[in-house]
Amino acid sequence: MYYNGYVDTPAQRFGILPGAFNPPTVAHLALAEAALKTVDRVIFVLPETFPHKDYSGVSFQTRFDLLRKVTAHEARFQAESTKGGLLIEIARELRSRLPQRAQLEFLCGRDAAERIVNWPYETPDTFLEMLREFGLLVAPRAGDYIVPERYRHRIATVPLAPEYQAMSATEVRRSIRQGSSWRHLVPAAIQDSVACLYGSGAPEESL
């Protein structure tokens, strides 16, 4: 049986990599490829809205087109969009499109994991309730992530080569503006597009 193009197989694990992808970088791909040792597929998610942020500069549709280009080379990668940008919103929207037995694992770096885990939720057990619906796979970023004892049943770590750990879309945009080397930071499939979109004369980016 198929769900939105996905084959329904027992206990299939989906890695979920949400982001602004402004632009997609080789670090995004490296994290997804590392996760494939743990999950069956990786879904790159570009939300239509973000908490407390708005799109500026490069449009949602253009970013999604870039994302589709960089995921096209790997059959186990998929680009998707969601209406909401909170993890729980993304998880529930994707679950409606995926096989009923799918397991969801969000991919993120150490810094993002610490924000997610330590966020001032309504009650101390709110995050534990969220972990009933998804898990986290955390990559090192300016240090390794130490999983708190109470969350070890749903949070695990994934290795990421040191050269990718500090890389960011912000670095790409800054390097382009400053005239520094940047093409090694971006997948080859979108380098020319990125040069046009973020080059001289392009609007400033805030997200």
Image: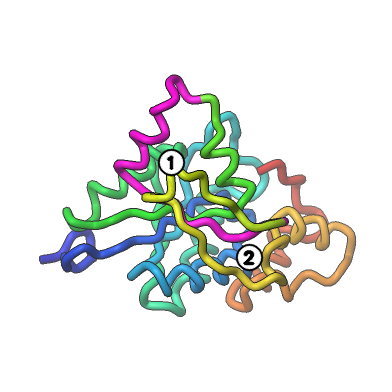
Residue furthest top as drawn: 122
Name the residue tied to disc 2.
Answer: 25
The kind of secondary structure element at disc 1 is helix
SS type, badge 2: loop
Q: Quadrant of the C terminus?
A: top right
Horizontal side of residue 7 vs 89, given as left or right: left
Residue visible at 37% across and 67% down? 39
Colour mapping used in the image: rainbow
Eye-nearest disc, 2 or 1: 1
| Badge 2 vs badge 1, beta-carbon distance below 8 Å | no
Residue most toward the left?
1
Residue nearest the viewer, comparing 25 with 48? 25
Of the two numbered discs 2 and 1 on the same chain, state the one appearing first in sequence. 2
Residue for point 63% across, 54% down: 22
**Label 2 crowd bin: few (<14), some (14–19), many (20+), radius 10 Å:** many
Q: Residues within 10 Å of mark 1 (few under 14, many from 20)?
A: few
Does residue 123 show up magenta in the picture? yes
Look at 23% across and 47% down and name the residue there.
96
Left or right of residue 25, residue 89 in this image: left
**What's the residue type where badge 1 is placed?**
Arg
Q: Amino acid at mark 2?
A: Thr
Number of the label disc, if any, that sits on residue 150: 1
Q: In x, y percent, where is residue 180?
A: 87, 67
Per the model, the C-alpha gap separating discs 2 and 1 is 33 Å
Q: Residue at x 58, y 29 (%)?
A: 52
State which region is magenta: 121-142
Is 54 one of the magenta-colored residues? no
Q: Position of residue 59 (x, y in %)?
A: 58, 48
Q: Quadrant of residue 99?
A: bottom left
Which percent across, then down, holds residue 191? 67, 72
Residue placed most toward the observer, 55 or 157: 157
Quadrant where the N terminus lies?
bottom left
